[in-house]
Image: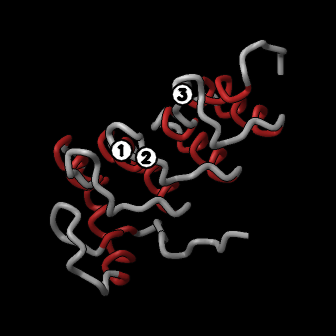
Amino acid sequence: LESSMEPLADRLATAAARGRAEEVRALLAAGAQPNAPNRLGRSPIQVMMMGSARVAELLLLHGADPNCADPATLTRPVHDAAREGFLDTLVVLHRAGARLDVRDAWGRLPVALAEERGHRDTVRYLRAATGGTGSGSHTGTDGAEGVAETLGCYWVWERKPRK
């Protein structure tokens, strides 16, 4: 890593926002804290390039909180990934424990944001993962079979225990 006067938290947030996985890895290895806010008060996982599932994986493997909410909008990384249709990142977040049943400041669930933008694969995943059939409702409680059927290679219920 080249030396910089910029604090590690800002450097990590900038690397995450730009989707620079190797730089994120190096900064984490150098001791950057995955939940440390940048100078604007946002954590790396909140500002990360949502299209980079690898950046999300690195941050989460180093202890980033997948459920950190923006204090003003109450959006979480899953809201951003769903709205933009980044299914791979959404799956990574969900496997790491991100909740899919939380609403933003306007009362919207991640599935509603995906529906608004027409991200059909993301909507299917969210519905199957939450056991609901419409707008993220949780009416279905025995959704495991539906999850396996709909998700194919996504085994979201097989989370590794945290140590």
Q: Residue at x 31, y 61 (%)?
A: 126
**Above or below: residue 113 compared with residue 109:** above
Judged from this view, the residue extending furthest toward the bottom is 142
SS for dot 3: helix
What's the amino acid at mark 3? Ala
Mark-to-mark CA distance, 3 and 1: 17 Å
Calculate the distance from the C-alpha at mark 3 to the C-alpha at mark 2. Answer: 17 Å
Please report whichever mark, 3 or 2, sits nearer to the chain's N-terminal start. Answer: 3
Determine crowd level at label 1: few under 14, some 14-19, many 20+ residues with C-alpha closer than 10 A: many
Q: Assess whether mark 2 and mark 1 are in contact (beta carbons under 8 angstroms).
A: yes
x and y percent of residue 17 in the render? 54, 27
Q: Secondary structure at mark 1?
A: loop
Taking depth in this image into account, of 120 and 83 the one nearest to the observer is 83
| Amino acid found under the numbered disc labelled 2 | Ala
Q: Amino acid at mark 1?
A: Thr
Q: Which residue is mark 3?
A: 17
Q: What secondary structure is marked by label 2?
A: loop
Looking at the picture, how far across and down is residue 125, in whole percent? Answer: 33, 61
Q: Nearer the viewer, mark 3 or mark 2?
A: 2
Q: Which residue is mark 1?
A: 75
Task: Say which residue appears at 52% left-offset and 24% top-offset.
Answer: 40
- Foreground: disc 3 or disc 1: 1
Residue underneath mark 2: 69
Pointer 3 or 1: first along the chain = 3
Seen in the image, is 108 located left or right of residue 51?
left
